[in-house]
Amino acid sequence: MKFESFEDIMAYAIGKEREAALFYEEAAKQEKYAGAKETFEAFAKEERKHEAMLENFSKEQLQYYKAQDIPDLKRSDYTVDLEYKPGMPYADILRLAAKREEKAYKFYSDFAWQAKTDEHKKLFEMLAQEEAKHKLRLETMLDDYMADMGD
């Protein structure tokens, strides 16, 4: 995908964050277990924060950012793309969510690498890090769930 300007990138990123929040909100509505429902609601809130951060981007937001090394379990690297369907099994929702976070991480990482200003680079690095944290949490949740299921 080619973007003509920083504003085009930001508009696309805002749309993707909004889409991610809607995905987690829908998954939370469909989830019958309270713990999973709360988890998906928490992810939705984080995606809404990312959306707001992009919509209201300012250099001040970046002053508190500290780069962290986030482990990558690479579970989603070996997962095929899935399409969300109401009622799909919990493990598949986790796989789908982790794959979505992987793609978001790659998107922000690519734009951090291509950024023309230090502020833009830092913004995309910060968002990539957030998506990497989400991916790690989801992959860990999937591993724990599969272990509980005896797999």
Image: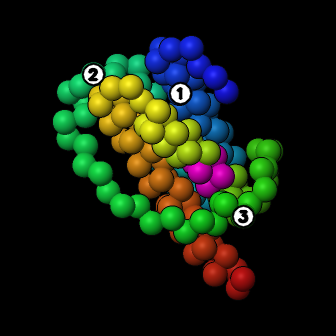
- To which residue does mark 1 refer? 13
Work out which quarter of the rendered image holds the C terminus and state it.
bottom right
Locate residue 120, reporting x and y percent.
36, 28
Q: Visible in this render: residue 149?
A: yes
The residue sitting at 41% across, 19% down in the picture is 55
Residue ID for mark 2: 58
- Tag 1: amino acid: Ala
Contact between marks 3 and 2 (CB within 8 A): the answer is no
Q: Which residue is mark 3?
A: 78
Between residue 1 and residue 150, name the one nearer to us: 1
The question of residue 100 being in magenta is answered with yes
Taking the image as shown, residue 110 lies to the left or right of residue 80, namely: left
Q: Which residues are magenta?
A: 98-102
Vertical placement of 59 versus 151: above or below? above
Q: Earlier in the sequence, mark 2 or mark 1?
A: 1
Q: Residues within 10 Å of mark 2 (few under 14, many from 20)?
A: few
For label 1, the crowd category at 10 Å Cα-Cα, with few meaning under 14, some 14 to 19 and many 20 or more, is many
* Label 3 CA crowd tier, 10 Å (few <14, some 14–19, many 20+): few
Give the colour scheme shown.
Answer: rainbow
* Residue drawn at 58 percent across, 30 percent down: 16
Is residue 24 inside the magenta stretch? no
| Residue 123 position in % (x across, y down) | 36, 33
Q: Secondary structure at mark 2?
A: loop
For the stretch drawn in magenta, the main secondary structure is helix
Look at the numbered disc 1 and give the secondary structure of its residue.
helix
Q: Mark 3 to mark 1: distance in Å? A: 25 Å
